[in-house]
Structures are given as C-alpha cells and as structure tokens.
Image (cartoon, rainbow, N blue to C red):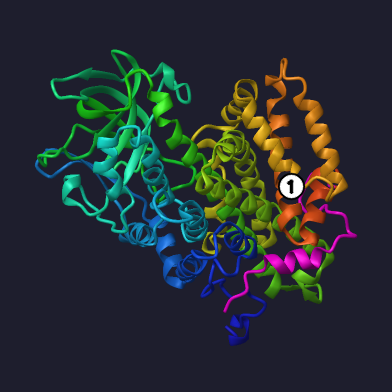
Amino acid sequence: MAATTHTVTNQVPPLVGYDVFAADRALSEAVERHIEPGVLPAAREELSTLGQSAGSAQAQEWGAQANEHPPVLRTHDRYGHRIDEVEFHPSWHRLLGHAVSAGLTDAWGRPAGHVRRAAGFLVWTQAEAGHGCPLSMTHAAVPALRTDPVLAAEWEPKLTSYVYEEGLRPAQEKAGVLFGMGMTEKQGGTDVRSNTTRAEPVSGEGEYLLTGHKWFCSAPMSDGFLVLAQAPGGLTCFLAPRVLPDGTRNVFAIQRLKDKLGNKSNASSEVEFDGTWARRVGEEGRGVRTIIEMVAATRLDCVVGSAALMRQAVAQAVHHATYRSAFGGLLIDKPLMRNVLADLALESEAATVLAMRLASAYDTDTEEERAFLRIAVPAAKYWVTKRCTPVVGEALECLGGNGYVEESGMPRLLREAPLNSIWEGSGNVQALDVLRALQREPQALDAFLREVGKARGADHRLDAAIKDLLTELADLEGIEARARRLVERMALVLQGSLLVRWAPPEVSDAFCASRLGGDWGTAFGTLPHSLDLASVVKRARPVAD
C-alpha cells in the first residue's frame, strides 16, 4: 500500500492545553462584574488555575476513562456478607478530588463564595459532567442542615472541606464528606407527598428508623443522604449516614444501578431502607419546606451545568471551524457556518450570563434578591436546560461525521445534555413553580420586573418584549395550559435584559433581534445576515495559550 494514502491533512488539532476559564470571555467578565475588587484577584487566580487543569490533556483523559469504565455495584463480598458498595474507576476519584480541593463544595462561608463556586463548577464540568452530581448535592445540603444548628455544626465543616476522602468510614474520622439525596419513589416521582417510606421514632432525641425505598438515589457511596419519609407528624426530612458513629454500616441496600442514557460515570441507584437509622432535620411534617433550599441550590447547578455543556460544545465547534477547510477556505470564514456558530454562541453566552447573575444573588442575600431568585431560578432552570440539547446537537453537526464519533467527545456531551432538564424537577414542574410564585408571592414578580426593567430604553425590541410580557402577566386565570410559553418569555426577557446591560453590542443586538424581535428562523444559523456575526464568533473562540 502506498505510504501517501496515510498522509493526514485537514484534520483539526485537539482542543487541549488551554485555560477554560480565561478563554471564556462571557464567564470571565461575569466574574469581574460580580466579585468585589478586594476578593477578585484571588478568585481570578484560583479560577485560572482550575481552568488550566480543565483544559489539560490529563483532565480530558480522566473524563474519558470515567465514562468508558462506569461504576460497578458489589452487593456482597466473597463470603456472602452484604456490603452494598459501588466501585468507581480511579479517574472518577481523581476528578472528584480535584473538584473538592478547588472549593466546588464551598460556597456558603467565604466572600463571593457562590459566584466563585458557580464559575468553578462551570469550568470543571467541561472536563467531565457526571461527577458534578455529588458535588452539587454536597454543596446544596448546607442550607437544609442549617435548619438544625446541632447538625449544621457537626456536618457543615466536613461538607465544605477541601479534602476528598473516598471509602466508607464514620464521618467523624474523615476530613471531608460528600452528601446525596433521596426524594423520589416508584409511585410518585416528583410528587413527593405521595412518598410511602416510613419513619418510626426511637428513644434518642430526633432519631428514627426508616423503612421503604427510593427510586432515584444518586452517588450512593456518599457519606450521608438527605431523604424524605413519612413520620407520625407528616412528611419529614432526615439525615441518613452510610456508616453509623460506632463504625457499623447503616442499612442501605442498593438494589441496582440505573442504566442511563448518559451521565455514565455517575452511579444512580435504587435503594431500600429496612430499619435504617436517621436523624430528623427540621420539624416533623415540614420536610418539603426543609429540603426546598437544597432543591433550589441544585436547580441553580442544573442551570450552571447546562451552561457548561453548551460552552464546551460551542468551543469545540468554533475550534473545529477555525482549523477545518472546505470548498476553498476555512469553515469559520464561510458566511453560513459563521451564522450557525454565532447563533450557538449567543445561546451559550446568554446561559452563562444568567447563571452567574443568579449566583451573585445568592451572595448578596438581601430580601430583594431572595424574592428575585424565587422566580428567576425555576424560570432559568426551565429554559436554559431545555436549550442545552439542541445547542449540543447543532454543535456536534458542525464537526460533521467526526463529531458523531465517540473519540471527538461530542456524543458524550449530547447524551449528557437532557439530564439537567429532568433532574430536580422537569420542565412542567419548573413552569408550575413559577406560576405558584406569581400567584402567591407578589414580591417575587416585583423583584423580577425591577431586574428586567434595569435595561428599559436601551433596546426597542427588549422594550416591546417587556410590554408584551406585562400584558400576558396581567391575566393569570387559566394560565396553566400556557405556563411553558409564559416562562419561556420570562427567561428570554431576563436574558435579553442582562445582555443589553453587560454584553458587547454585537451580542446583545443579535440576541434581541432574533430571540425578542422575531427576526429568526426555527433552526440555528438563521440570524439576520446584516448583524456583526464575525465578532460574535470571534468572542466565542477558545484561544489556546
């Protein structure tokens, strides 16, 4: 065979060896915007260090290995003893260890903690998304535990630790722990009030024994779990440790691991409780209220995680088009490809800017910001997570057949893309949550409209969209059937307002023209040709050092 047939030409070099944080202008600008000057240099340095790790060949290899070698359930040891352990590839532990050491479970007790953590989560998720689940639940457990000062004092320092210790041991023997969550059951799913798991009080103060099942329990090798069960006083939140203080294993029978579409590196399981020891968190009968802050925090992580997947997909597409030639020139210089890339970049930047604005509201933590989050989090969770799958799918197509091959990494992104829209409440749940806030909490709508109104007068298409939204909000009777349409408009108007205030003119102009002004088709790559699309694409390019 002639050697010339093996000459490799016109193949794109791997996107590797770059700073994922610094190369993302929308993200780095958001960090500059939302972190006070005294904290900014330290935050910028830590995020750049994490960004270089995320863009390294080593981290990319860890991500590939963790997905190629998914977790394995070991219910019994060789002698027949029940052990209920899940074995992970070493790369999974390396990813988790790096994330914990970078502070991705520490947001609640340091300056600008939520913005720093959200930015880091967005950066590190681009290396591998599956291990974000235990990171997210561990981070989000803190506000739920704070309803019980004794439990918070015991667990919070370990939840926010920068030390990752794998293996099942008593929590008091570990420098850092991870948490999971068990809410849904076979018969109810999102309808947690139909839960049948029972909690029987025992002699110790706040101690119970749980009997029942959980249909979805992610990261079952975590050190503790917040679960819902029916106590004598009603649905209640409990903390169930994997290992009891005396070193014995708690009853935590893992029935099987879920065989999922994506998220392969992460173990999602079905578990059974049979006299499982647990401690009550909050008051009996107030389980949903106790755990709702954890749910809100994990919902924000769904937004951040989807923004990360979109950013990585767009970065790969722009990188490919920068180096790939077709029909006499580089793809990135072809007007039609440029339109597609710019359209994808708009979606990615809008998601990032919105996610970071929500994180900043957690840091500010005023009554006004809490009211804003009440509507903005479910609206963002609804819209951003829904946009993730079409964005990743179109970005994959930009790579052509190469993108359809596993080695490109794009199929893994595509399989992961629908997850955040389903986890922590699917689209209908988020839309209904927004409706409840509109109907019961007028201060939440006021805060949302004040935020959107900060950009009034800056773009006529945004002004018109705000006016139309106000008209729709004026009549909430029989609104459930049109809830998705309303929440979509709310999310788009909010994104438009943020971009008009903070993004370069070429970005906000293209977003408002297409998403708010109606000058858009029904597929990506249908932006008005008169826009400055080259600048939008250039801004989205992940330039390697």
Near-viewer residue (245 or 392): 245
> In terms of secondary structure, where does tag 1 sit?
helix
Is residue 541 within the magenta segment? Answer: yes
Q: Residue 431, position in %: x, y?
A: 62, 29
- Residue located farthest toward the top when viewing the structure as drawn: 232
Q: Residue 126: within the magenta?
A: no
Where 111 falls versus 203 (above or below)? below
Would you identify the image quadrant in which residue 372 lies?
Answer: top right
Q: Which quadrant would residue 380 be assigned to in this image?
A: top right
Query: Does residue 349 lie above or below 298 as drawn?
Result: below
Of 316 and 350, nearer the camera is 350
Say if residue 415 shows up in the picture: no
Does 80 sit left or right of 209 as displayed? left
The residue at 54%/41% (across/down) is 366
Q: Nearer the viewer, residue 527 or 507?
A: 507
x and y percentages locating residue 345 in the rendered image: 70, 58
Q: Is residue 41 above or below residue 475?
A: below
Q: Which residue is located at x 62 percent, y 69 percent? A: 542
Find disc 1 in the rendering and name its residue: 497
**Could you tell me which quadrant the N terminus lies in?**
bottom right
| Residue at screen point 69% across, 42% down | 451
> Few, some or many C-alpha atoms within 10 Å of disc 1 (few <14, some 14-19, many ≥20)?
many
Q: State left or right for residue 390 relative to residue 19.
A: right
Q: Which residues are magenta?
A: 520-545
Q: Nearer the viewer, residue 86 or 179?
A: 179
Q: Residue at x 51, y 60 (%)?
A: 123
Query: Residue 235 placed where, x, y %?
Result: 36, 19
Which residue, as the protein is rendered here, is positioned at the far bottom?
3
Is residue 435 in view?
yes
Height in image: 396 above or below 323? above
